[in-house]
Amino acid sequence: KEEKDEESVHLAKWPVSGEVDSELVSQMQSVREVVSLALEQRSKTNMKVRQPLQTLRIKHSFESDSHLYSELIKDEVNVKEVVCDIAMSSDVELDTNITPELQAEGNARDLMRAIQDMRKTAGLQPHDVITLKVQTSDSREAVVNQFMTEITKTVGAEAITFGDADGEEVTAGENSFTIELTKL
């Protein structure tokens, strides 16, 4: 807040609106429609949004800021790439083939979600820093190591160690882990 600003946003005047960019509004409606159709396809195939997929092919072509719109679609649908193909017969086509790399990333996201649930159950706040002790097999330890940076950042962990853990058993994909969570 600057000195010239009101004491509270509730005391401030309503902002004056500018011109409406009708092209931007139209493009965003198209983005929302594509995302909605892709998420509907995910739902029909029982594919969780946390599971990343490789490609979404769309019939629609965005004229301006296509990179920005593609990034929005990729984030919302959780795909690695968006391909525009105006010759398609349907509006969207989702590649549901899950490679081992995509499966590993999906498992890591499931693990992060389980740890976040453990944080919530323990009454931790987002700013609380934790350490994790993980008990699992060597092959499953590799999944954690592969995504170590993303996991520690997402769950607010200072460190992750492996060994005998006295904690909660969680499942991430087909992987089973025992997680011991300690607040620092």
Image (cartoon, rainbow, N blue to C red):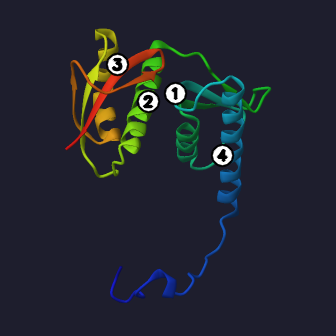
Cα–Cα gap, marks 2 and 4: 25 Å
Picture disc at residue 31: 4
Circle 1: residue type: Pro
Q: Residues within 10 Å of mark 3 (few under 14, many from 20)?
A: some
Q: Residues within 10 Å of mark 4 (few under 14, many from 20)?
A: some
**Disc 2 vs disc 4: Cβ atoms closer than 8 Å?**
no
**What's the residue at 35%, 43% (across, down)?**
122
Which sits earlier in the primary sequence, circle 1 or circle 4?
4
Tell me if 106 is positioned left or right of 95 in this view. Answer: left
Picture disc at residue 143: 3
Q: Secondary structure at mark 2?
A: helix
Q: Secondary structure at mark 3?
A: helix
Cα–Cα gap, marks 3 and 4: 33 Å
Which one is nearer the viewer's eye here, 80 or 184?
184
Circle 4: residue type: Val
Quadrant location of the N terminus?
A: bottom left
Circle 3: residue type: Val
Q: Secondary structure at mark 4?
A: helix
Cα–Cα gap, marks 3 and 2: 11 Å
Picture disc at residue 52: 1
**Disc 1 vs disc 2: Cβ atoms closer than 8 Å?**
yes
Q: Secondary structure at mark 1?
A: loop
